[in-house]
């Protein structure tokens, strides 16, 4: 059977290639190979290698473009997670084949998605350098931009920058316009990152216990997998609500402590 690459070459020889936007989705939750690799923090080369090994199903073909779905993304993340735990591609192939013989692989991938899918519905957004300068002005120096990238608030993507959380970026721009030094804001975010990560680790560990009761590294029985996935999906927003409520409480306490003192001092000055 001819390879996909050679077939595509012959097709390209028959008619001129149409321009494709490499990162654009054809429909909701569909990805080109470039977009799929980026979302899974992998590479196009890895995607093709996993397909060649039978670890990743081929894409859906529409014309000359292959489109990948959320199932492909979940499988690619599953492979990445297993590789990070020390599994080889051969081990992963054996696991997938075993799952296909015993467990419902879709249910296993559904469980993986319940754990690894983004916990925020916020959609990433791209910004050009002129757009960023328009938002932040001259305070966005090359040094400050490098710090923003180091913190992961922006990711270079060709000639543009990709913000995973545009809301945070826009909030930072507004705070900067209000007179808060941008470098000081970045220091606060850097300090916040470690504390939030510690709380997140503790919160997720509570969910991990649901899996650990089957034995470390052991798959739950097939009949338990859908229930576990459903439980994790229900726990995710509850965990977010708990963290948000605690952050709101802490901000309220700090505002009353520090801003309240300043307002009281201003009122005292006015009464003199």
Image: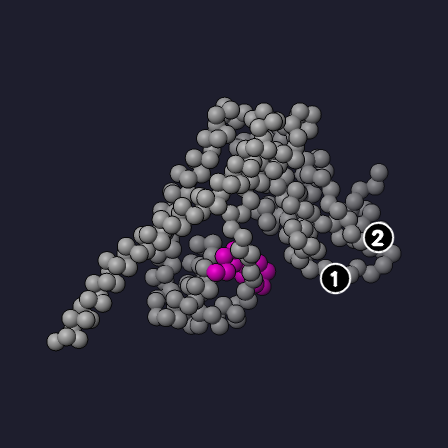
Q: Is residue 160 magenta?
A: yes
Coordinates of residue 77 in the picture (x, y in percent): 59, 41
Q: Is residue 23 magenta?
A: no
Examine the image and state in which quarter residue 83 appears: top right
Please identify the quadrant where the C terminus is shown. bottom left
Q: Which mark is residue 11?
A: 2
Report the residue at 38% width, 55% height from top: 189
Disc 1 crowd, CA 10 A, few/some/many (<14, 14-19, 20+): few
State the residue at coordinates (43%, 35%): 206
> Which secondary structure lies at badge 1?
loop
Residue 271 rendering spot, x and y as whole percentages: 14, 75
Disc 1 to disc 2, how far (Cα)?
15 Å
From this view, report whether residue 16 is shown above or below residue 107.
Answer: below
In the image, farthest residue toward the left: 272
Tell me which segment is drawn in magenta.
155-167
Pick out the residue farthest to the right.
14
Q: Residue at x 47, y 57 (%)?
A: 153
Please, is residue 114 above or below residue 258 in the view? above
Colouring scheme applied when the structure was drawn: one colour
The tag earlier along the polypeptide, 1 or 2, is 2
Looking at the figure, which quarter contains the N terminus?
Answer: top right
Near-viewer residue (261 or 9): 261
Residue occupied by mark 1:
19
């Amino acid at each position: 059977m001819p390879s996909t690459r050679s077939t595509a070459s012959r097709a390209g020889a028959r008619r001129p290639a149409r321009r494709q936007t490499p990162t654009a989705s054809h429909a909701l939750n569909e990805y080109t190979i470039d977009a799929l690799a980026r979302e899974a923090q992998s590479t196009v080369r890895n995607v093709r290698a996993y397909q060649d090994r039978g670890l990743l199903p081929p894409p859906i073909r529409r014309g000359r473009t292959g489109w990948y779905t959320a199932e492909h993304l979940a499988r690619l993340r599953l492979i990445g997670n297993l590789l990070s735990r020390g599994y080889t591609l051969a081990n992963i192939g054996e696991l997938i084949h075993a799952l296909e013989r015993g467990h419902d692989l879709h249910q296993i991938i559904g469980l993986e998605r319940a754990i690894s899918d983004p916990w925020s519905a916020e959609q990433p957004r791209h910004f050009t350098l002129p757009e960023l300068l328009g938002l932040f002005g001259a305070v966005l120096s090359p040094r400050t931009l490098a710090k923003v990238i180091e913190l992961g608030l922006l990711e270079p993507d060709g000639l543009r920058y990709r913000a995973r959380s545009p809301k945070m970026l826009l909030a930072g721009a507004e705070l900067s316009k209000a007179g808060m030094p941008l470098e000081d804001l970045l220091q606060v975010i850097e300090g916040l990152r470690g504390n939030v990560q510690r709380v997140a680790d503790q919160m997720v560990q509570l969910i991990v216990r649901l899996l650990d009761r089957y034995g470390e590294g052991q798959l739950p029985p097939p009949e338990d997998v859908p229930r576990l996935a459903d439980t994790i999906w229900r726990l995710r927003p509850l965990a977010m609500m708990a963290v948000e409520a605690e952050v709101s409480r802490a901000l309220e306490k700090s505002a009353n402590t520090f801003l309240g003192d300043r307002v009281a001092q201003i009122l005292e000055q006015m009464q003199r």
